[in-house]
Amino acid sequence: MKRSKRFEKLEKMPINSDGFSYEWVDVGLVTMESPNDPNPSIRIENGRIAEMDGKERKDFDSLDKFIADYGINVAEAERSMGIDSLAIARMLVDIHVSRQEIVKICSGCTPAKLVEVINHLNVVEMMMAQMKMRARKNPANQAHATNLDDNPVLIAADAAEEALRGFAEVETTCALARYAPFNAIALMLGAQTGRAGVLNQCSMEEATELELGMRGFTSYAETLSVYGTETVLIDGGDTAYSKAFLASAYASRGIKIRFTSGTGSEVLMGNAEQKSMLYLEVRCLFLTKACGVQGIQNGSINAIPLVAALPNGFRAIAAENLIASMLNIEVAAGNDTAFTHSDFRRGVKLAMQFMPGTDYITSGFGGIPNLDNVFAGSNEDCDDYDDFYVLQRDMKVDGGIKPIKEEDAIAVRNMAAKVCQTVFRHLGLPEITDEEVEAATYAYCYTDMPPRNKAEDMKAATDMMERGITGFDIVKGLHENGFEEIAERVMNMLKQRVIGDYLHTSSVLDENFKVMSAINNQNDYMGPGTGYRLSDERWAELKEKFNALKPQDI
Amino acid sequence: MEKLNANTDYPLYEKHPELIKTQTGKSIDEINMENILSGKVMPSDCRISAETLVYQAEIQESFGNPAIGANFRRAAEMTRIPDDRIIQIYNRMRPHVSTKEELLAIAEELETQYDAKINAALLRETAEVYEERKMFRVD
């Protein structure tokens, strides 16, 4: 065939480097509305659920049973299940129906019922509903700080810059697992240097995460994965019951957690029971609720290349975020995995959570170059800051971060690197040189850093844990070496874990360590003039564009 | 004392700081720089108490989230269990790791050693479900 020059050009566009697939129900390659998704149903006998979504209690697997026993409000169930799904769908976009009323109805719904509700919505309706149903009134954002070399000085500097930009949470992980204690400490120090009260976590396997939290090196944990089929949950090394115990273990040490799930993960793990990805994800959300866990990180997460390859991919992801909010769960909404070669496409993906706002719009934004992102690369990274800011400015939308001046970023990065250097010295860890401090201050990525002796670092990290070092040692080290204010901040973070106010739904801390959660910052959106509106002060921050033309320049 | 309420008693630290004690019975504001530097408060003081977790549970229960309340009540009991033992128990609860007898023994331990009745009940229920679903270790 003689080729069309336009079609030839189109083939070479970035979008056509992405992978796409037709639906394939038999293996669960369907985002929404699999013909095998169950129809909603409920039967209650003696105050207990005897049938749920077409399955009799005797046929329940462990996940069904846990959801039926702990995840559904039996007192509301018959009323909720009796309301037509289309009617509930309409309430979601009806400004006269409050969030609280919908949360109450949803508390008595089964997984299949909420899926049926959501299937009625198009994406704009989902976004409208998300704006209303987000648990916390003020939106916020989260950032990743990692690098390929696990360089702790660079992590500290990056976290400080992210905190200064306004991220409410920062998250790190390791390329090499034995670096975890260093990365966790560096992240905490950097974050507290950038802005008091930023929450921090180090994503590792469950037991290590808990250990880091118990030591006072992290303030929350997020990488507690759940899956929507019993088989995959077991393959992941857990059951509903072990996860419930683990959740309480964290709370017993005053550490905030959220679970992680996402459409597509069951297919990737090879057992989707021919159900739609959304239906299985909704089971994860019910499991989260049943465990009494306040929040979820979802939005497909690292399965997004698969979900986005299928029809309805973005819509399914918007739906899973929304259903979490309908269940009154905090949502850290994904947008955290590179999945497309097309800038056009990744921007639109972000917009679906950015415009309505979620508790955390991304989970997280790579505050580092893509190549340094040990979480396989985010949908946004540090090269995108100005795009993000301009979109906030274009639309008067609060995406949770604000423009900063280069000199302020340099100053805070330098200070964080010095703070890290001081703490390392105080704890007897391998030296951080002045050359490293200088490099971290101005670095773009890990290749700008002098290489460290990794074997020595990892040995020292293990030794530090064996010596029983805790957050208290860090506080002392900071205070005794001229960083009184940072010492005070780290101490206040430790104090939060004794108070427990930040264990509640959708919590963040402001710069005075005042907690703001779904309880004292309830989303009260009921149409124009209500809900979250940018204050004049906030708008002044967000519309700042340092290189924009000023009237006096003309 | 009357149960706490989300609308009037939260955040606890602002509304009722006097109610917040560390696990060792110190008042929350004793966790301060002076006391840390002098060694008057230790890391072992910097732990949430069972009472505080029960207050936080009451707040969630009044807010219509009984499951979160239940989580905090399990957690309140767990404040009495050492760190290492908690991690061990969690690992024993993973699928295909323990036998029925082992899980029931843990339930017994939770109840008798740590006065953790809610958690003991969770372990017993876990044993029951694992039996139905064949999730015990097979030697």
Image (cartoon, coloured by chain):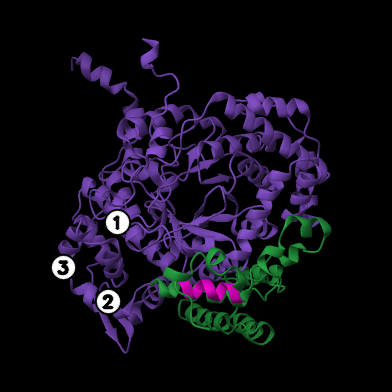
Mark 2, secondary structure of its residue: helix
Q: Which residues are the magenta region?
A: B51-59
Q: Quadrant of the C terminus of chain A?
A: top left
Q: Residue furthest top?
A: A554
Residue denoted by label 1: A276
Q: Which comes sooner in the sequence, label 2 or label 1?
A: 2
- Looking at the rendered structure, the kind of residue marked 2 is Ala
Q: Which comes sooner in the sequence, label 3 or label 1?
A: 3
Between label 2 and label 1, give the one nearer the viewer: 2
- Looking at the rendered structure, the kind of residue marked 1 is Ser
Mark 3, secondary structure of its residue: loop
Q: Mark 3 vs mark 2: same chain?
A: yes
**What shade does chain A have?**
purple
Q: Residue furthest front?
A: A552
Residue denoted by label 3: A84
**Splitting the image into 4 quarters, where does residue A450 fall?**
top right
Label 3: chain? A
Q: Are marks 2 and 1 in contact (CB under 8 Å)?
A: no
Looking at the magenta stretch, what is its main secondary structure?
helix
Picture layout, residue B41 above or below residue A352: below
Tell me if residue A501 is in the magenta stretch. Answer: no
- Whole-percent x and y of residue A203? 58, 50
The tally of labels here is 3
Q: Is residue A333 left or right of residue A209?
A: left
Q: Is residue A395 left or right of residue A450?
A: left
Residue denoted by label 2: A77
Q: Are marks 3 and 2 in contact (CB under 8 Å)?
A: no
Residue neighbourhood size for the residue with mark 2, other residues' Cα within 10 Å, grouped as few (<14), some (14–19), many (≥20): many
- Whole-percent x and y of residue A279? 31, 60
**What shade does chain B have?**
green
Q: Is residue A207 visible?
A: no
